[in-house]
Amino acid sequence: VTPSVVSTVAEMSAWSEEVRARGERIAFVPTMGALHAGHVALLHAAREHLPRDTGRVVLSVFVNPTQFGPAEDLARYPRDLQGDLAIAAPAGIDAVFAPTPVEMYPPHHQTTVRVAELEQGMCGATRPGHFVGVATVVCKLFNIIRPHVAIFGEKDFQQLAVIRRMVVDLNMPVQVVGMPTVREPDGLAMSSRNRYLDPDQRERALSLSRALFATRARSAAGERDVASLLAGAQALLAGVVDRLEYLELRDAETLAPLTSMGERPAVLAVAAFIGKTRLIDNVRLGPAAAEPR
Ligand code: PAF
């Protein structure tokens, strides 16, 4: 079944209104397109969060300009709606919302959403304004599509924390679900930006997941010294990545920086450049991290 592709806010809202009026639930997967198996897993999860045989899955494909910095890859970000539809359709989607930038941000648009503390540090430190762009567009998408449940990948760990906070703080009636990162067979986290990598860079990109997995193994084996865990991971990245942007151990729920491994779940997160391509990845450590993911 070909899903309907909707490009205006008015049409999308009317579609959602009709679905809701029938008493059906809506599950939503927001993306910037350039879909890969990680997104397909989110679409399957969306379907699983609907009652059997009812409900609608909506995918959005929108390369949101407000979450890119001036020196970032907005212009070269891959855009291929037909290719995306071919990847997404087998997962059983009902509608695709693919607006233009001016449809989302008409002249005089001036309202933003800022999750003040969670946007600090990690990706927020080097991408000023990024999470304001993300929170604002996700808030708008929620208001247009009015989903009951929305599915996000855990690869963008800080983004997921920002969105969870926004939904609580602004009393949005949406259940936010985070899904584990989907990886290539060799461990590389799936990302739309992996397609920028040449073969040598693709090989070096593996150092991110390798460093994270090795550190998780040391932590599981009883190493609790944060400085030692981080130094070990850094040693695996040094000279392999072109620039390490951050490697941080944080509380998995509050994102507070950790000075010691305690009883709470932690996340080890990394951002690094391989050539001009900025990649991120993370793994959970500590309690509830026993299962590799
Ligand atoms: O994770 C993404 O692809 C984007 O940040 C999102 C959530 C679709 C907002 O533009």
Image: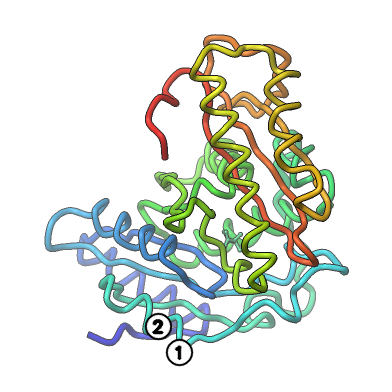
Q: Crowdedness of circle 1 by 10 Å Cα count: few (<14), some, many (20+)?
A: few
Q: Element under label 2?
A: helix
Q: Element under label 1?
A: helix
The residue positioned 42% from the left and 70% from the top of the image is 59
The residue positioned 43% from the left and 63% from the top of the image is 39
Q: Does residue 206 appear left or right of residue 144 in this picture?
A: right
Q: Can you say whether 124 is above or below 97 in the image?
A: above
Whole-percent x, y for residue 291 in the image: 37, 30
Amino acid tagged 1: Gln
Read off the residue under disc 1. Answer: 82
Q: Does residue 149 appear left or right of residue 239 in this picture?
A: left
Disc 2 to disc 1, how far (Cα)? Answer: 5 Å
For the C terminus, the image quarter is top left
Q: Is residue 176 visible?
A: no
The single residue placed furthest to the left in the displayed view is 53
Q: Nearer the viewer, residue 27 or 72?
A: 72
Mark 2 vs 1: CB contact within 8 A: yes
Whole-percent x, y for residue 41 in the image: 36, 59
Q: Is residue 59 visible?
A: yes
- Quadrant in which residue 185 is drawn: bottom left
Whole-percent x, y for residue 154 in the image: 51, 46
